[in-house]
Image: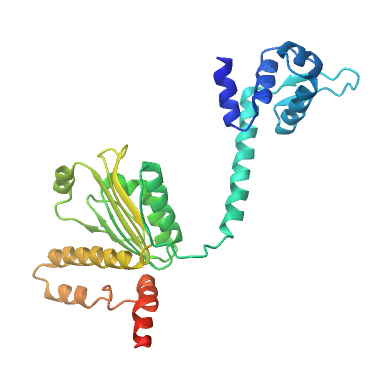
């Protein structure tokens, strides 16, 4: 039992001796570092050092009696809360520092994702960083996993093109509903999540029906692939809107005149793609 506990504490940042000293004090009365070393058969100097570290981390209290300094353990709940707060602070500091690093190359490789949490978190980050336009095609449970990120993007003024398969009440977004939404879900027996942001980055993922397993997912910042997927999803949504309009010729005309097609709208990914390939080639000719 103690071995397992010490292992867990080691994973939280304590070394083996610190974990052993803390668990010993947790179940024993206050003692000096010297006596702790004797009881644990550890070198006294090493125990003193472990006590100092534990005190700084908030796991041990040391009496002010300089002649006979007694050590006592802080309760496990209080100690773990401090470790959690310290860990969160370290994450925040690391995130701030790492965000200042700019990549020195453009990574357009296609990556396969193997983790459900990673696929969802990557999608949420895409929506957090999108600047102008996002195209989303999501089955019900998949959409719920990113819903707040979609709504936050819309609140920031991002143009959202959202295709759903069951009705959802949303502010600032008018979804397009697949006519055979329930039948699609029944046919697929899974959850789909396809997202393209700014025509620059895309993620397509297929999960099992309750989102506990990831069947297949890829993510990439490939400009060409992202632009093509953007075009395909936008065209699919347009066809659905035209199908809903049916005989309403004015509505059909309005839909077709909207600047939502690739050639009609300045998509960030399109600008980068043409700058990188098309414009450069034309200039060289």
Q: Residue 262: x, y in percent?
A: 28, 74
Q: Which residue is depicted at the point 19% across and 41% down? A: 189
Is 103 on the left or on the right of 64, as rendered? left
Vertical arrangement, residue 243 with respect to residue 48, above or below: below
Quarter of the image with the N terminus is top right
Vertical arrangement, residue 40 with respect to residue 123, above or below: above
Tell which residue pokes out farthest to the front in this image. 285
Is 8 on the left or on the right of 258, as rendered? right
Tell which residue pokes out farthest to the left in this image. 247
Quarter of the image with the C terminus is bottom left
Image mark count: 0
User: Between 129 and 41, which is closer to the camera in this rendering?
Assistant: 41
Q: Which residue is depicted at the point 62% across and 32% down? A: 81
Q: Which residue is depicted at the point 37% across and 50% down? A: 146
Vertical arrangement, residue 183 with respect to residue 58, above or below: below
User: Between 205 and 259, which is closer to the camera in this rendering?
Assistant: 205
Q: Residue 32: x, y in percent?
A: 81, 16
User: Between 242 and 103, which is closer to the camera in this rendering?
Assistant: 103
Vertical arrangement, residue 279 with respect to residue 68, above or below: below
Q: Residue 260: x, y in percent?
A: 27, 72
Is 30 on the left or on the right of 93, as rendered? right
Q: Residue 39: x, y in percent?
A: 73, 11
Q: Which residue is depicted at the point 14% across and 52% down? A: 180
User: Between 83 and 277, which is closer to the camera in this rendering?
Assistant: 277
Is 276 on the left or on the right of 56, as rendered? left
């Amino acid at each position: 039992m103690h071995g397992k506990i010490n292992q867990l504490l080691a994973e939280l940042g304590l070394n083996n001796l610190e974990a052993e000293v803390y668990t010993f004090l947790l179940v024993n009365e206050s003692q000096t570092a010297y006596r702790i070393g004797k009881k644990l058969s550890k070198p006294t100097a090493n125990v003193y050092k472990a006590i100092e570290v534990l005190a700084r981390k908030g796991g041990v209290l040391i009496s002010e009696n300089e002649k006979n300094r007694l050590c006592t353990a802080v309760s496990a709940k209080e100690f773990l809360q401090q470790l959690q707060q310290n860990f969160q602070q370290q994450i925040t500091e690391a995130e701030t520092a790492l965000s200042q690093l700019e990549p020195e190359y453009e990574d357009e490789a296609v990556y396969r994702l193997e983790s459900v949490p990673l696929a969802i978190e990557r999608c949420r980050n895409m929506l957090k960083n999108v600047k102008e336009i996002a195209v989303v095609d999501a089955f019900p449970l998949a959409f719920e996993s990113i819903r707040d990120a979609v709504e936050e993007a819309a609140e920031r003024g991002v143009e959202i093109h959202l295709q759903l398969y069951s009705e959802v009440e949303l502010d600032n977004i008018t979804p397009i509903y697949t006519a055979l939404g329930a039948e699609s879900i029944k046919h697929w027996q899974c959850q789909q999540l396809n997202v393209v942001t700014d025509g620059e980055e895309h993620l397509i993922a297929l999960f099992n029906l309750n989102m506990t397993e990831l069947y297949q997912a890829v993510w990439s910042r490939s400009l060409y692939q992202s632009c093509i997927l953007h075009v395909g999803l936008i065209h699919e949504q347009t066809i659905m809107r035209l199908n809903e309009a049916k005989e309403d010729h004015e509505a059909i005309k309005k839909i077709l005149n909207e600047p939502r097609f690739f050639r009609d709208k300045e998509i960030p990914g399109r600008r980068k793609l043409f700058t990188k390939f098309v414009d450069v080639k034309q200039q060289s000719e």
